[in-house]
Image: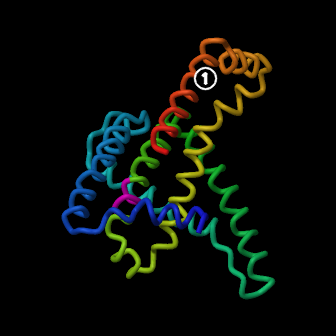
């Protein structure tokens, strides 16, 4: 009951009416504008405004989803098949790295374009997740709900890493703990804490 799955299901429980699904769909489509704006700002597009480029970005996104499914595949029916799948996953990882290096080396694709594309695909992926959660019954009928849950877990894990990374970084420095101790145990804080305890005690006595 305290797992991530149960918390995630509770977070999506508010979408129950048809009107809520329509509003959720409209709000989710705003992330596609983010992708649309970034795609045409890439240096590799050479300021080309053709819609074919936007369509090609969706093909790349589909390939990324298929690669994600291959990387997260963990068959357990036999002992030989998991080894082959891990070998295939290793080859795919090497192939992806080689393809990115070739794009940067032999085309106008730059490292800045790589980070911009990652931001665009993150926003588009979040849009697809929101739409899948909004139309949960349809996604479950298609048998894609497990994939949606795994991708959502990755998004939450990535966001948690971004939030806690500054905390971990500052915890390496000793002056942070000293600064925190001075804030917590200064006279003004202690006086305010004593007053709050007194007020809380008076309220408790009045209620009794």
Q: Residue at x 42, y 53 (%)?
A: 126
- List x then y, in percent, for residue 208: 49, 45
Q: Residue at x 38, y 56 (%)?
A: 58
Of residue 124 and residue 89, the one placed in the foreground of this image is: 124
In screen coordinates, is 46 left or right of 168? left
- List x then y, in percent, for residue 125: 43, 54
User: Image height check: is 37 above or below 14?
Assistant: above
**Quarter-of-image position of residue 189:** top right
Q: Which residue is mark 1?
A: 194
**Quarter-of-image position of residue 163:** top right
> Main structural element of the magenta stretch: helix, strand or loop?
helix
User: Image height check: is 56 above or below 45?
Assistant: below
Q: Secondary structure at mark 1?
A: helix
Please rate how many residues cluster around mark 1, counting C-alpha atoms within 10 Å: few if below 14, some from 14 to 19, many from 20: few
Specify start and end residues of the magenta stretch as a single range.
127-131
> Is the N terminus in the top left, top right, bottom left or bottom right quadrant?
bottom right
- List x then y, in percent, for residue 151: 52, 61
Of residue 73 and residue 43, the one placed in the foreground of this image is: 73
Of residue 51 and residue 119, the one placed in the foreground of this image is: 119
User: Image height check: is 40 above or below 198?
Assistant: below
């Amino acid at each position: 009951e305290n797992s991530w799955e149960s918390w995630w299901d509770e977070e999506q429980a508010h979408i129950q009416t048809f009107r809520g699904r329509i509003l959720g769909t409209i709000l989710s489509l705003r992330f596609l504008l983010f992708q649309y704006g970034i795609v045409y700002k890439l240096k590799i597009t050479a300021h080309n405004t053709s819609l074919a480029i936007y369509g090609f970005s969706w093909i790349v996104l589909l390939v990324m989803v298929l690669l994600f499914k291959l990387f997260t595949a963990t068959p357990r029916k036999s002992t030989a098949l998991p080894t082959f799948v891990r070998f295939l996953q290793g080859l795919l990882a090497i192939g992806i790295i080689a393809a990115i290096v070739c794009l940067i080396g032999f085309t106008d694709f730059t490292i800045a374009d790589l980070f911009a594309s990652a931001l665009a695909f993150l926003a588009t992926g979040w849009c697809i997740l929101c739409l899948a959660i909004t139309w949960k019954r349809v996604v479950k009928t298609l048998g894609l709900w497990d994939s949606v849950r795994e991708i959502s877990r990755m998004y939450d894990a990535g966001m948690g890493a971004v939030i806690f990374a500054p905390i971990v970084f500052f915890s390496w420095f000793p002056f942070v703990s000293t600064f925190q101790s001075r804030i917590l145990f200064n006279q003004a804080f202690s006086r305010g804490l004593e007053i709050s305890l007194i007020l809380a005690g008076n309220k408790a006595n009045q209620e009794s």
